[in-house]
Image (cartoon, rainbow, N blue to C red):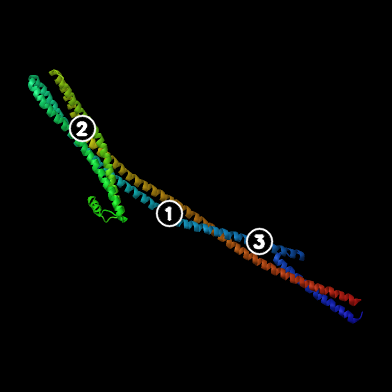
Amino acid sequence: MNKKVQYQINTIKDKIVIYNDTIQTLIEKRNSIIANDNNDTNNTNNTNNTNDTNKIKELQNLKTSLELEQQILKKNISNISNEIKQYENYLESLNLMHLNNINNEDNIYKEELSRIEEQKANIIEENKKNLELAYIDKQNLYNNIELIKNELNIQNNKISQIQIISHSNRKNILDDLHQKKKDKLIIQQSINTYKDNEIFSFNQITTLENSNDQIIDFKTNIINSNYNIETDDTKLLNYYNEYNIDINLSINEKITILDKIFNDNENKIKLIKLKYKKQKNRNDMTIKDIIDIDNYNKNNRIKILGYKDQFKIEKEIRNNLENILNNMTNNFNTFDDIIIGNINNDFLNMNNELENDILRSYSRLNIMKNRIIDNFNNETENKKQLIENNKNKLLDLHNQFNNIIVELENVKTNTKNTNIIINEITNIDNEIEKYQSIILQMSNDIEKLKN
């Protein structure tokens, strides 16, 4: 082997030593990087590459998991925020509903008071009508008492006549004829008085019914005039004057006034008819009694009776008249206490009941208001508590969300750093492979030179 070749071989060997040193330096650098990354200096090259790859996958999986959790948290944050907004909106509407409920109860109370006041006015008017009719009954009773007194006077005269006749038959016959005439006149006068009382009631009913017929005609003319239908203006003006209605009122106001007058008349007609029927029954019975007594007297006068029999009969009739008079007088004397008193007591009882209705309405108003306020306070407190709970949840979710952001940043940083290390190790491995390839080539060159 010549020196030149030997020199070349030695030169190559020196380079191989240098490259081996370089490879060793790169290996130490690589191991140092791996040691810093894994805190483990015993990993082999393949193991380190596998660990780095697994670490990248773990970081990617962790990143995906965190991002998914982040999306879920975003959705939960949005849902809870919406719930809080809904509760806050509900609280605003709850205040409005609360005020409406209070106002509704106040309006119900006012309507109830208005109804009670209207009923009070009605019972006052009804009491007035009842008293008026009662005083008419009292006057009729007074008139009937006077009639019975007259009948009693007639009967006393008859008894006196019988006593006189017993002493003078002829005088008795003459006086009896005169008395018959007087009795007939008195009986007819009594019947006429009863009939007059009936006619008075009947005329009242007729007057009220005619008034209602006029009211219907008046309303018809008002409506026709309002719709420009031909009407008798003079007749219409007379109606306005008769019923004292302001012509300038609206049609509804006019109709309302006329309806009230019409209804009042109908109520009066019903009451008068009821009283008329009762009074007529009493009058019919009384007239029948008078006629029966008169017929009885006529029939008995035809018979020839002895003094004692006639005296006994007339005395019994007088006793009956006295009993009737006593009953009527007693009814008249107690009329104010019993009849008028009952009417006034009924009025006071109904009025007291309406006063109690006012107290009950006020009590109900307070109960309902307190119930509404309690429900409002409970519902408000409940919704405020839900809002507070959701705000706490929201705060916790925000904290979790921020923690995930921090974790994601750490994952991104770790992934970036791991990629840098992988790239750095890959570059070192490439360098080592390069020098190993050069050394292999140089070793082949040496073998060739030796040969």
Mark 3: which secondary structure?
Answer: helix
Mark before the other along the chain sequence, 2 or 3: 3
Label 2: few (<14), some (14–19) or many (≥20) C-alpha neighbours in 10 Å: some
User: For the residue carrying disc 3, how many other residues have a C-alpha within 10 Å: few (<14), some (14-19), or many (20+)?
Assistant: some
Residue designated by label 3: 62
Look at mark 1 in the image and give the residue it sits on: 97
Choose between 440 and 375: the one closer to the eye: 375
The amino acid type found where label 2 is placed reads: Asn
Secondary structure of the residue carrying numbered label 2: helix
Q: Are marks 2 and 3 in contact (CB under 8 Å)?
A: no
Q: Quadrant of the N terminus?
A: bottom right
Nearer-the-camera pick, 94 or 67 = 94
- The percent position of residue 407, horizontal first and vertical second, equals 62, 63
Q: If you read the primary sequence from the N terminus, does the residue marked by circle 1 or circle 3 appear first?
A: 3
User: Which marked residue is nearer to the observer: mark 2 or mark 3?
Assistant: 2
Q: Measuring from the top left, give residue 350's x and y in whole percent.
A: 29, 41
Quarter of the image for residue 316 reads top left
Q: Is residue 164 above or below residue 86?
A: above
Disc 1 versus disc 2: distance between alpha carbons? Answer: 63 Å
